[in-house]
């Protein structure tokens, strides 16, 4: 269990850092910057990613993780403090995070401007909560779906309270939990869809689950394709909105067999590539720890010093 949790955390961090190289780019612009595609870290570790040179907000470095990993660690710290998922403790830890806190990311900006750990929002449907909830799936086994859904909500509502955001967070946490338990791709998909449906319907008051429906349709399509090419996936499911980003990540994690391969595919698609790559990496890392690229993770350790092994050990002791 500890090995799967550690590999899941490594999948998050490596997917985040690899994916950052193409975040927000169209697929065409990915090929303009990287004519041969992304094959790993494209440059020396610690050097500024070329397209971020001179960026006024942050000059992102090769191998540097983003707020996705930073806030995942924050959620894990909050869980370890309480032995449970409580939104006030999560909010307190999130307020210590510094990355991507600017008006361009409204969900985080509003939360940090309020500076209130107990704050709860009903707004925002982006994937900012889903990218940090993996520790919820590490805490609860997949047979405890109600607790996973509740925990995902508690880890989300400081910054994201919309029904699609809560569905995405619950789906991600459930998929990670199922993968840690050794579930197969079909069972992981079913767990994610059930969690998403429950979270969305509880929040919206409707019996119609839009998020799970999007996941189901995407999975049915992509699992029938003999090969997944970045250009083809980008043409149909470009990850730039609530109904494509997390559904694509979970779909890749259940139709592919390698965390490394899924991370590279997500990165070469473009769009919200770091989010897709980190979530897919979290699930596939837990499914098969050997498919996480240890050379990539060595770079992440040097550039960021995240100490994910200690987190994995402590979370594995709490898992229930």
Image (cartoon, grey):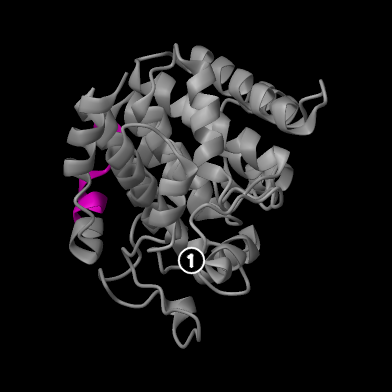
Residue 299 occupies quadrant: bottom left
SS category of the residue bearing label 1: loop
User: Which quadrant of the figure contains the N terminus?
Assistant: top left
Q: Residue at x 56, y 31 (%)?
A: 170
x, y percent for residue 91: 46, 53
x, y percent for residue 303: 23, 65
Q: Residue at x 49, y 22 (%)?
A: 147
x, y percent for residue 234: 66, 48
Q: Residue at x 70, y 39 (%)?
A: 164
Q: Going by the image, does 14 lie left or right of 213?
A: left
User: Which quadrant of the figure contains the C terminus?
Assistant: top left
Residues 306 and 140: in front is 140
Residues 141 and 25: in front is 141
Relative vertical location of residue 33 with respect to residue 3 in this rendering, above or below? below
Task: Magenta stretch: give its range.
Answer: 290-298
Q: Going by the image, does 219 lie left or right of 53?
A: right
Q: Residue at x 41, y 13 (%)?
A: 183
Relative vertical location of residue 109 with respect to residue 306 in this rendering, above or below? below
Q: Going by the image, does 210 lie left or right of 47?
A: right
x, y percent for residue 250: 54, 32
Q: Main secondary structure of the magenta part?
A: helix
In the picture of the structure, the residue carrying the numbered disc 1 is 34
Residue 200 occupies quadrant: top right
Q: Going by the image, does 95 lie left or right of 102?
A: left
């Amino acid at each position: 269990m500890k090995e799967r949790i550690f590999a899941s955390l490594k999948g998050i961090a490596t997917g985040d850092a690899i994916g950052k190289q193409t975040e927000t780019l169209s697929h065409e612009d990915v090929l303009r910057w990287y004519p041969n595609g992304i094959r790993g870290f494209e440059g020396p570790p610690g050097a500024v990613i070329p397209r971020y040179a001179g960026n006024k907000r942050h000059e992102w470095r090769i191998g540097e993780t983003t707020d996705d990993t930073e806030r995942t660690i924050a959620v894990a710290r909050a869980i370890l403090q309480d032995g449970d998922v409580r939104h006030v403790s999560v909010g307190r830890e999130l307020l210590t995070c510094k990355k991507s806190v600017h008006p361009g990311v409204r969900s985080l900006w509003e939360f940090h401007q309020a500076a209130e750990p107990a704050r709860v929002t009903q707004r925002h449907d982006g994937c900012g909560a889903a990218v940090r909830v993996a520790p919820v799936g590490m805490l609860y086994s997949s047979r405890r779906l109600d607790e996973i859904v509740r925990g995902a909500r508690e880890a989300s509502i400081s910054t994201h309270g919309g029904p699609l955001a809560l569905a995405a967070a619950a789906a991600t946490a459930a998929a990670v939990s199922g993968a840690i338990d050794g579930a197969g791709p079909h069972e992981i998909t079913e767990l994610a869809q059930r969690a998403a449906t429950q979270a969305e319907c509880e929040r919206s008051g409707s019996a119609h689950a839009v998020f799970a429906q999007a996941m189901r349709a995407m999975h049915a399509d992509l699992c029938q394709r003999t090969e997944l090419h970045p250009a083809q996936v980008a043409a149909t499911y470009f990850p730039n909105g609530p109904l494509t980003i997390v559904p694509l990540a979970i779909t890749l994690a259940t139709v592919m067999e390698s965390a490394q391969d899924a991370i590279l595919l997500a990165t070469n698609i473009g769009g919200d590539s770091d989010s897709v790559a980190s979530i897919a990496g979290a699930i596939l890392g837990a499914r098969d720890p050997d498919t996480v690229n240890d050379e990539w993770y060595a770079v992440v350790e040097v550039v960021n010093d995240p100490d994910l092994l200690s987190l994995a050990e402590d979370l594995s002791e709490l898992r229930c």
